[in-house]
Image (cartoon, rainbow, N blue to C red):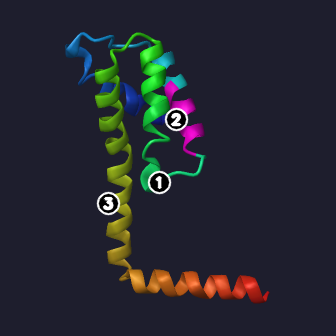
Amino acid sequence: WLAETFKYWFIMQAFVHMDAGFPVPFFVLMLMNGIVNLATTLPSAPGYIGTFDAPGVAVLEAYGVRGSVAFGYTIVLHAALWVPITLLGVYFFRRARIGWNEVDTARVQGAQSTSSG
């Protein structure tokens, strides 16, 4: 999580010029990281929409970041964390020539073997 918090810090640098409570101390970003990662363990929409964003905004607002800036930062951060790993996954799926049909077939076969075993 420490390495991920550095990404939080790096992205925060793009928001410092807004003079809306940024920069916050690094420990606030560590706290935010811990809270949003724990919140994403709750059942949610794909991509953790909402369970990542709402707690992130709440932590930043608690430490004096203006709400609109906290929201914008959290959305950009969420995209910066989600998009690269998703694109990497798509790349490796295509490289291995795995399509959605194969994924669906494997899922069905896994469900059948679990129910019969």
The first of marks 2 and 1 along the sequence is 2
Q: Position of residue 58 (x, y in %)?
A: 47, 23
- Name the main secondary structure of what is drawn in magenta: helix
Q: Amino acid at mark 1?
A: Ala
Camera-nearest label, 3 or 2 = 2
Rendered residue at 21%/15% (across/down):
18
Tell me the quadrant of the picture where the C terminus can be found: bottom right
Quarter-wise, where is residue 79 in the image?
A: top left
Tell me, for residue 77, which label it has, or none.
none
Q: Amino acid at mark 2?
A: Val
Q: Is residue 97 above or below residue 91?
A: below
Residue indicated by mark 3 = 87
Q: CA distance from mark 2 to mark 1?
A: 14 Å
Q: Which residues are magenta?
A: 32-40
| Count of all numbered marks drawn on residues in the image | 3
Q: Position of residue 41 (x, y in %)?
A: 60, 46
Tell me, for residue 45, which label it has, or none.
1
Q: Position of residue 104 (x, y in %)?
A: 48, 82
SS assignment at label 2? helix
